[in-house]
Image: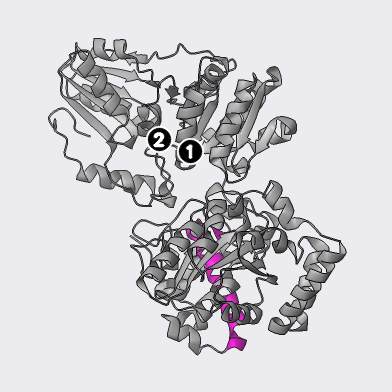
Amino acid sequence: MNSPSPELPELLGSIHNHADLMKIPEAELPRLAEEIRSTLIQSLAVTGGHLGPNLGVVELSIALHRVFETPRDKIIFDVSHQAYVHKMLTGRAEQIHTIRQYQGLSGFAKMSESPHDSYGAGHAGTALSAALGMCAARDLKGEDYHVVAVAGDAAFTCGTTLEALNNISQTTRRYITILNDNEWAIDKNVGALAKYFNSLQTSETFSWLRDKTASFIEKLGGTQAKEFAFKLEDTTKNLIFPSLLFNKFGLRYFGPLNGHDIPTLIRTLNYIKDLNEPVILHIVTQKGLGYQPALDNPTKFHGLGSYCVHDGETQGSPTPTFSQIFGSTLVDMAKQDESITAITAAMASGTKLDLFKEAFPKRYFDVGIAEEHGALFACGLAAEGMKPYVAIYSTFMQRCVDMIQHDAALQKLPVRFCMDRAGLSPDDGPTHHGLFDIAMIRSIPDVVFMQPKDEAEFVHMLRTMNHYQNGPTVIRYPRGCGSGVPLPATAEILPIGKAEVLQTGNDVLLVSLGTMIGIARDTATLLEERGYSVTLVNARFIKPLDDECIRLHASRSKVICTFEDHSIRGGFNSAVLESLEAGEITIPVEAIAWPDQFIEHGSESILRKNMDSRRKPRYKKLFLI
């Protein structure tokens, strides 16, 4: 149940549609911006969410909705984690306190939530291509609405963004891209494009172009806007890089402009919206503007749980997360093995490879939002005898499946793929749940695929990965903390493809994968209280599956139940069924897994409770869970 809606400030509370926003005098829009910031800071302190990105786009969102009218006009946000303000300006301000809560607003744009969300997303690099498709559809149908793609500078390191840029000018004459330049993705942006956006140009030609651009800015926004642009040039940006980049793609460039200057943004957007040529507007914003803790720590406040409004402090966990164990264990191994390297895609802090970066900066590689490149880059390292660990969230590792198959597995290259946030990623919802990776990867030949039951076994598996050299290895592990099991003083090398039998019985075989072992143990206890004899197996390996162990204990049991934090289709249960069929063992099999559907956002306890209430086990007499 969501809590009652808190009372909104005067101006924000008056906005229910585009007409309401247009009634507010332009001179009052900065006040509206402050009301929005205050509401975001107070609401997200309770719910958590992407505070920093949304504080940075308050003025931009106001300007966009003053100039364009959704849902007729389309605004597509890349990743869309910065769409909270857009939601508040399109009739959902009274629900902002429900964001990322069960049955509340999604933390991302979502087409089924509102017609104003013209395109849903949760991954980077989607906006420009989707917007171009909408432009092509509009042109083919002879319609006349505007399409605006809003993307951060980090999205321009993503391959799909560059592919879209390459196709814009040959597809449509009317296309608007907003480059929201704040130097950050989740962590500090990296790579040649990031350096390019930050470089200063000093030649006479660049000075001439600079003056021309400054003149245009002054005409639109006045002397103050021009002076701001010159200040940017003296610090981090320049006014003239598009002649070297965007013009080559056939886009007319405007900017950079102060992304927090509402009047200038409105005048510029009004000018460019009716140009009969593709355009890109480059604005410069501050991530976290209006809240000092978010300005001081952009990485932390990119996305976080609840916090104290006064100082931004969050409650720490008493036990280390799987991510922290991964980062620290990799550092420990790398001290003994100079061939170990670490790769991430713009998520050093999320994967805790920031620990590795600090310890071994020369062996650490952040490729930006370019997961496919990161995987291929790792294959090159492995081909030359290095031991690359690729740490990417499960939901983003989906982009690497081609590379895992075509490059790593086919050539038996020992790349270590480490999938953080595997399984449920509760509050972020369907774009971020890691519920499909087993099905995507286990069909690939010559891959070793594993999942630990607890923190200690996780350390053993990382050591096992480092030792294995006959092909790619993959490990999946959940978001957050484990059960608090102490870490081993010395890591073991596990036998590949061998399960762990925790107890034996004759009636029921329970086969658990990963941290579902807790639920499996509880189930074993319930069954034993009812007089059943139970075998409990910790699978450890998804591939190669321990066929011998499963078939042996299945032949002695009356029914099997498998446990996994994954979708039911193509996952671990499917692997067990295939093994039983190959062994010609006929036995009833029950699966505890997520249903064949996209799971919404909400707390893990609520989502699991709802799943259990909908389940109809075929063998109720045995499975009272």
Work out whether residue 138 or residue 116 is closer to the camera in this orientation and state it.
138
The C terminus appears in which quarter of the rendering?
top left
Asked if the magenta segment contains residue 50, the reply would be yes
Residue pictured at 40% horizontal, 42% vertical: 424
Relative placement, left or right, of 558 versus 38 is left
Residue type at mark 2?
Answer: Asp
Asked if the magenta segment contains residue 536, the reply would be no
Q: Please say if 407 is above or below 41.
A: above
Q: Which residue is mark 2?
A: 437
Q: Are marks 1 and 2 in contact (CB under 8 Å)?
A: yes
Q: Quadrant of residue 244?
A: bottom right
Q: Main secondary structure of the magenta part?
A: helix
Work out whether residue 194 or residue 21 is closer to the camera in this orientation and state it.
194
Q: Position of residue 69 (x, y in %)?
A: 45, 79
Q: In this view of the protein, can residue 215 be seen by the observer?
A: yes
Q: SS of the residue at dot 1?
A: helix
Relative placement, left or right, of 239 versus 88 is right
Badge 1 density bin: few <14, some 14–19, many ≥20, Cα 10 Å:
many
Q: Quadrant of residue 522?
A: top left
Q: Position of residue 461 (x, y in %)?
A: 50, 20
Residue type at mark 1?
Answer: Met
Q: Which residue is mark 1?
A: 397
Q: SS of the residue at dot 2?
A: helix
The disc, 1 or 2, on the residue closer to the chain's N-terminal end is 1
Say which mark, if any, is on residue 86.
none
**Colouring rule applied to residues:** one colour
Q: Please say if 428 is above or below 364.
A: below
Q: Position of residue 3 (x, y in %)?
A: 38, 64
Residue pictured at 58% horizontal, 51% vertical: 314
The N terminus appears in which quarter of the rendering?
bottom left
Q: In this view of the protein, can residue 320 be seen by the observer?
A: no
Question: Magenta span covers which residues?
Answer: 26-52
